Image (spheres, grey):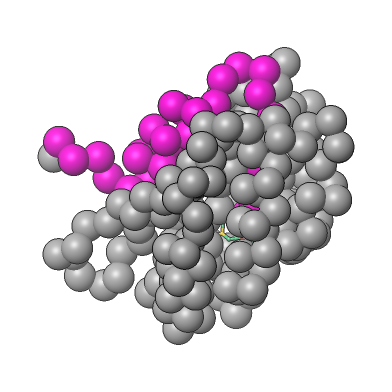
Amino acid sequence: MKIERILPFARTLLTSAVNEGDTVIDATVGNGHDTSFLAKLVGASGHVYGFDIQDEAIQNTSERLAKQGIEQQVTLIKDSHSRLKKHIPTHLHGNLTGAIFNLGYLPGGNKKIVTLSTSTIQAIEQLIELLAPEGIIVLVIYHGHEQGQIERDDVLHYVSNLDQQIVHVLRYQFINQQNNPPFIVAIEKR
Ligand code: SAM
């Protein structure tokens, strides 16, 4: 298949916006796959700030990074991404080049603990402010579970109304697949 699938495309977008030495955000670290990807992308001279509200996610991610010897490139923060801005040093405001959200629940964890539209939207709002020009926020939206459908609708409503003078908003989605596969919303700051 020539059309890029959802998860690889999320990484293609991040790779296009993020360079070695940059500072980026993983807003939902979970088991740390994206945190590790971002840490390698920014390298030893860059930095990743990773957020999750669950101890289990912080622990799993911390172990994954340590195994790969890249833990010094990452700061893991056990807090909601809705309070993201206060954890990012002021001199980095306006300088972040990338951020990723994988919405939904922790794979292998408690399926009742999910991302929620109010905090997701608060985090996006702050990130738009913190991004550098041409910085990108990638949201991978999982809408197979009940709360996920509410979050999908609320997030789509919010991003569709963002000012086009400030951001470009893309939706990337296979529209003939069964069982609500995830799709991407990408927001690029102008
Ligand atoms: N990208 C991850 C990976 O590579 O394994 C998967 C992330 S998982 C789909 C979603 C994560 O978001 C869960 O670990 C959950 O605890 C976390 N989460 C839920 N609400 C959150 C919030 N308000 N702030 C930060 N993380 C949150």
Which residue is the extreme one toward the front? 165
As drawn, is 149 to the left or to the right of 189? left
Residue at image location 70% in from the left, 22% down from the top? 46
Residue at image location 45% in from the left, 71% down from the top? 157
As drawn, is 154 to the left or to the right of 83? left
Instruction: Residue 6: give x, y in percent of width and height.
Output: 33, 48
Q: Which residue range is magenta in the image?
A: 2-29
Q: Quadrant of residue 7?
A: top left
Q: Is residue 138 magenta?
A: no
As drawn, is 3 to the left or to the right of 65? left
Residue at image location 64% in from the left, 73% down from the top? 118
Q: Is residue 28 magenta?
A: yes
Instruction: Residue 29: give x, y in percent of width and height.
Output: 64, 50
Choose between 50 and 98: the one closer to the eye: 98
Instruction: Residue 28: give x, y in percent of width and height.
Output: 63, 54
Instruction: Residue 86: give x, y in percent of width and height.
Output: 85, 51
Asked if 24 appears above or below 21 in the picture, the reply is below
Asked if 69 appears above or below 144 in the picture, the reply is above
* Ligand 1 found in image quarter: bottom right
